[in-house]
Amino acid sequence: MQSSIAISIVIPVFNEEMNIGTLYSRLNNVLSDMNISSEIIYVNDGSKDSSLQILKGMSELHSNVKFIDLSRNFGHQVAISAGIEHAGGEYIVIMDGDGQDPPELIPELLAKAKTGYEVVYARRKKREGENFLKKITARIFYRFLARITSVEIPVDTGDFRIIHRKIQKLLKKMPEQHKFLRGQISWLGFNQTFLEYDRQERLAGQTKFTYRKMIRFALDGISSFSNWPLRIATIGGFIVSGISFLLIIYTLYQKYFGTTVPGWASVNISILFIGGIQLIGIGILGEYLGRVSENVKNRPHYIIRESNLENEEI
């Protein structure tokens, strides 16, 4: 059934009180020029500042502003998922709330999508306002992920993209707890393309995507779309077993045909080496088993505390 809303904008918010107003002004100008029916869904992901109060005030003044207030901080990817699941538009745009994703690119994304693409993602040419370490680690991660996964996940892209409503319906059928949306959307297939853009600096404030969150995000991406770490653990086990077998042959030879000098160094080195490999393998298995356990529990991905969306049961 054709949606009465042409486009939905999904924006996760976590402590962005300084950016909400400015970003909305830019968004409103873009949507007004496009002259189409629209809604902007802000997902408050457990903000500790006045973000929620600002969103409530905006929703009272502007009928196209919707908000979802989650009961706590569930994480960036889950917040986006919540917005996508409640979006009513024929097309859905995903963008961050810090102003780094320019809303002025939305008309081009929509125009490209209407030429026959279910997904149009924005690929970064430049990343302004980010330090060298973050740029280089991001570059390495995306290229590494592309090499170890069977799914073609585009490099140099974030979550800024436009998707068709059919993609939304399929994402709802993917219940994994540890979300990696750019991988999930790539896995779905369909016609996908990109537009290039220069990513801007944050409008104000500091990034909320810390190195700790980056590492967790990287682990989610790797474990969700690749068995490569398990294969490495298996290959490592065979290599260590082979080395250990050769050491046993060498030790027996020295015992019966050579001379041996009592010592603890070789014994300790062997034990530490083999023990280290075993611990790495156990740790990798633990990461995968932990994710299986989370999915088996079948807990809801998020809990909504409050919302102004119609027919939303809290």
Image (tube, rainbow, N blue to C red):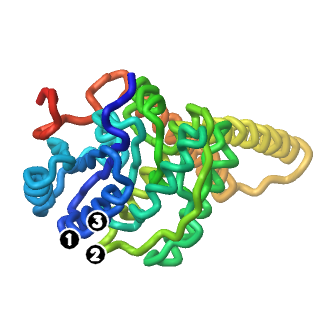
Work out whether mark 3 precedes mark 1 in sequence or the reverse, and give the earlier one: 1
Residue 222 position, x and y percent, is 55, 44
**CB-based contact (under 8 Å), mark 3 and mark 2:** no
Kindly tell me whether residue 89 is visible in this rendering. yes
Mark 2 neighbour class, 10 Å CA radius: few under 14, some 14 to 19, many 20 or more: few
| Label 3: element kind | helix
Counting residues from the start of the chain, the first of labels 2 and 1 encountered is 1
Q: CA distance from mark 3 to mark 2?
A: 11 Å
**Quarter in which the N terminus is drawn:** top left
Who comes first in sequence, dot 3 or dot 2? Answer: 3
Whether the residues at callouts 2 and 1 have beta carbons within 8 Å, the answer is yes
Residue where numbered disc 2 is placed: 204
Please tell me which residue lies in front, 306 or 167: 167
Residue 199 x/y as whole percent: 48, 69
In the rendered image, which residue does mark 3 sit on?
23
- Extreme-right residue of the structure: 257
Given residues 240 and 128, the one toward you in this image is 128
Q: Amino acid at mark 3?
A: Leu
Work out how far the residue at label 3 is from the one at label 1, CA to CA, in angstroms.
Answer: 10 Å
Residue positioned 13% across, 51% down in the render: 59
Residue at 32%, 47% (x, y): give it. 10
Tell me if residue 220 can be seen. no
Residue type at mark 2? Ala
For disc 1, the marked residue is: 18
Q: Amino acid at mark 1?
A: Met
Residue at screen point 79% across, 45% down: 247
